[in-house]
Image (cartoon, rainbow, N blue to C red):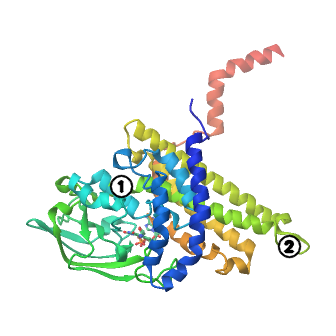
Amino acid sequence: MAWDFETEPEFERQLAWMRAFVRDEILPLETLVDEWRRAGGSARFARATAPLKEEVKRQGLWAAHLPPELGGHGFGQVRLGLMHEILGRSELAPAIFGNNAPDSGNAELLAIGGTEEQKKTWMEPLLAGELRSAYSMTEPGAGADPTMLTTAAVRDGGEWVINGHKWFTSNASVSDFLIVMCRTNDDPDSEPRKSYSMIVVPTDTPGVEVVRDIACMSDPEPVPGMPGHHCEVLYRDVRVPFDNVIGGEDGIGQGFVLAQRRLGPGRIHHAMRWLGQCQRAFDTMCERAVTRRASGSLLAEKQLVQEMVAESWAEMQAARLVTLQAAWKMDQLVAAGGHHSDARIEIGVIKFWGARVLHNVIDRSIQVYGSLGYSSDLPLEAMYRRARAARILDGPDEVHKVSVARQLLKGYRPADIPTEHVPTRRAAALAKLGDLLDLEAANT
Ligand SMILES: Cc1cc2nc3c(=O)[nH]c(=O)nc-3n(C[C@H](O)[C@H](O)[C@H](O)COP(=O)(O)OP(=O)(O)OC[C@H]3O[C@@H](n4cnc5c(N)ncnc54)[C@H](O)[C@@H]3O)c2cc1C
């Protein structure tokens, strides 16, 4: 029976290298990013991170999420999860390891569903870090329910003509191409989930207008030219070759299937990165607890603070185990020739549970720091603002809860008399074993 919570020594050595690299090389950069932004954007940032990316490549850890035939290492989801937990400590780390959203998910999407030509044109340069991409699905009028998306692509000879209005297309303003979810079947009676396709649109195509980087909680004053912004995008009579539909002719109507396949492993990586953030907030909180005194004793000696420490650790540990178990299940499914999507209960749970724990732990850490925690002299307030998005993106928590509950309830049947009804069970037990009672009475 395999039920193992240990990491192989060889991979543990790689994890140790990553921990040291994130701590010594990446975390210090964080404190300079705002100055670089004010000084004119991404060129300095790119200069500072280029040698780090080279080092990651030398270690063979670049874009590790991909299968071996595409330059990855076949790590599987458990090992990738452990790796993302370390990268999650800093929001800068994923880009330095070649697996930042949305590029990593888009590369996977092209790997899973793209034609050979699409892989060559878009995926390979994406993996090499030569191109940047964005994923353009959500619209001002439709998000959680994608069957309400109205952006449409109409075939005109050898081209698609796309019209629509998207928003929250992360990185659109710095992207080279967008993957646009469009309705490609204008028959109103068609099955909605088979009526959408994904089309690759180079960002400089006439008719594509990136209207703005949307100011939001994580970045109230977006600086143009920097990655990480969420953008509003208009598509007006945008013409691209017919072959830009992902999967070619076979990919028409496959938009939702591809979207699901893109999101499964991505959610494991998200959830493990959230745990990296949690651990950082937790370490920060504990350091304060053993340092700060109030009302005659250390905070660490106050039961209400101890409760925060214990609750946080318990929640993090539960989130970690449930996420690694989901990753393990995915690996088992794939090894048996199945598919990730059969782990949808586990994937749904880690999405909303992970988002909740992320919020709770950062919130408690801020609380233990009081005014200092609320200030930007510590990273906690920025972590807190970013964490809020976790409950909304990749589908709001409510949608995942509904889906998890539906799946779980499928395993149950109605019962007019509850299965646990004691009088009924007692009558059944008497009918089965009543003779024994008589026997015992006779023997006493
Ligand atoms: C930081 C960030 C980055 C993002 N990046 C991208 C990106 O790169 N590309 C992209 O296409 N999109 C992106 N999004 C958009 C994201 O996918 C959507 O916000 C999400 O799908 C929810 O859609 P919505 O915002 O339109 O909310 P709505 O669909 O309007 O839902 C609003 C609220 O209604 C409730 N609700 C909705 N449905 C249900 C239900 N079935 N049951 C119960 N309650 C429900 C929930 O409380 C939900 O939060 C990003 C969002 C954020 C915050």
Q: Position of residue 150 (x, y in %)?
A: 27, 72
**Residue at the limit of the structure toward the left, as seen here:** 157
Question: In terms of depth relative to the viewer, which is nearer, 413 or 81?
Answer: 81
Residue 292 percent coordinates (x, y): 82, 72
Find disc 1 in the rendering and name its residue: 108
Mark 1 residue crowding within 10 angstroms, few (<14) / some (14–19) / many (20+): many
Residue 82: horizontal and vertical position, in percent? 55, 51
**Residue holding disc 2:** 293
Relative to 441, 24 lies left or right: left
- Asked which secondary structure carries label 2, the reply is strand
Ligand 1 location (quadrant): bottom left
Of residue 360 and residue 148, the one placed in the foreground of this image is: 360
Q: Is residue 346 above or below residue 122?
A: above
Name the kind of residue labelled 1 in the image: Glu
**Left or right side of 181 for 373:** right
The image quarter in which residue 156 lies = bottom left
Residue 141 seen by the camera: no
| Residue 349 in sight | yes
The structure residue drawn at horizontal position 59% and vertical position 76%, both measured from the top left corner, is 31
Quick check: 390 left or right of 427?
left
Q: What type is the residue that disc 2 sits on? A: Arg
Q: Which mark is residue 349?
A: none
